[in-house]
Amino acid sequence: MAEKIVITSGKGGVGKTTFTINLGLALAKKGKRVVLLDFDFGLNNLDVVSNVEHLVVFDLIDVLNNRCRTKQALIKSPYNENLFVLPTSHSLNKDIENKNFKDVIEDLDVLFDYVLIDCPAGIDKGFHRAVLNSDSAIVVTTAHLSSIRDADKVLSILKSYKLRRTFIVVNRYRGDLALQGVMFSLSDIENTLNEDIIGVIPEDDNFINGVVDIPNLDCVKAYKIICDNLLKNERKIYDCFKKYKGFFGSIRKELKKKIWKIKKLIIGLKI
Ligand code: ADP
Ligand code: MG
């Protein structure tokens, strides 16, 4: 049986889709059979971000409308033979019932070890549909106040679903800003949300292309740690401050600080 994990956040643009794909790849590399399921009808982009858009023949809407079988809509990822994508499109018929979704999840349940569900932003019908079809949740937040507040709201709603496991992931974290006291500390976030942080992913320009598959990159290491935490039920956290420790680290930190000050000055002048 697969563990069905909904990746949610409340706020849009915090990195849910990017997280779904890169966590899926990390799990697939560990030999787990993983399917990424796009439940974001309307703003669906899992196929684009995971680079399988050109391979789509059928999608989830076709499966729900009985135009094809679940297996026919699965796309093998070019990144790993254990990783599959079940994309969607934006024309969800209003009379499709939750029973149809349950049937799809049942089909995937026997084929995979993990079903990662990319949830739409917000706490409307689409959010509830995604959570209803999951047994665990990962709430993605950034260290910004608006994102943390939305994550808090989502966590309180999730409580009513009695999920097996619920975790927080802090995305786009900047160790240099946290050391300057400009960004919330991880313990502040954990205490505010009152839930375990299962991972921290640094801000990294490599995510511009969606999937990051370059070994030894810091962000890939961060995903590997989250993957191990999930598999072994551990709580190791990627060290976002390592780069700013020691002699060269302190130079890097000072340089970043100066750049930050100059940026603020320029913004101030523009206003
Ligand atoms: P969501 O699905 O929550 O709307 P996306 O996954 O589409 O968010 O990500 C929004 C943007 O943030 C994308 O441009 C993506 O490349 C970027 N992004 C996500 N994670 C990171 C990260 N760790 N570092 C830098 N950029 C990131
Ligand atoms: Mg998304």
Image (cartoon, rainbow, N blue to C red):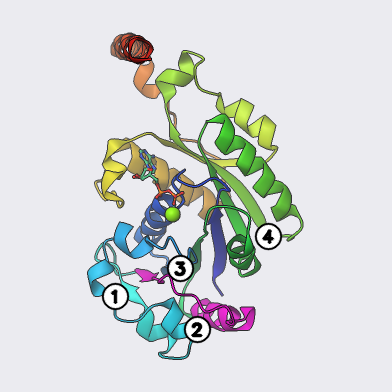
The three-letter code of the residue at mark 2 reads Leu
For residue 141, above or below residue 179: below
Taking the spot 27% from the left edge, 67% from the top edge, the residue there is: 52
Q: Which residue is mark 4?
A: 164
Give the percent coordinates (x, y) of residue 12: 49, 47
Query: What are the residue bounds of the magenta stretch?
Result: 83-110
Please state the total of marks drawn on the protein image: 4
Query: Which of the numbered marks, if any, corresponds to residue 155?
Result: none
CB-based contact (under 8 Å), mark 4 and mark 1: no
**Left or right, residue 114 beside residue 259:** right
Task: Using the numbered discs, state the Cα–Cα distance from disc 3 to disc 2 in whole angstroms.
Answer: 13 Å
Q: Quadrant of the C terminus?
A: top left
Q: Which residue is mark 2?
A: 64
Q: CA distance from mark 4 to mark 2?
A: 26 Å
Are dots 4 and 3 in contact, CB under 8 Å? no
Q: Taking the image as drawn, is residue 216 in sight?
A: no
Q: Which residue is mark 1?
A: 56
Circle 4: residue type: Arg
Q: Nearer the viewer, residue 268 or 69?
A: 268
Residue type at mark 3 is: Leu
Q: Secondary structure beneath disc 2?
A: helix
Vertical side of 232 occupied by 82: above or below? below
Q: Is residue 99 magenta?
A: yes
Q: Which label's residue is closer to the chain start, 4 or 2? A: 2
> Between 50 and 219, which is closer to the camera in this rendering?
50
Disc on the earlier residue, 2 or 1 = 1
* Crowd rating for badge 3 (residues with CA inside 10 Å; few <14, some 14–19, many 20+): many
Q: Are marks 4 and 2 in contact (CB under 8 Å)?
A: no
Secondary structure at numbered mark 1 = loop
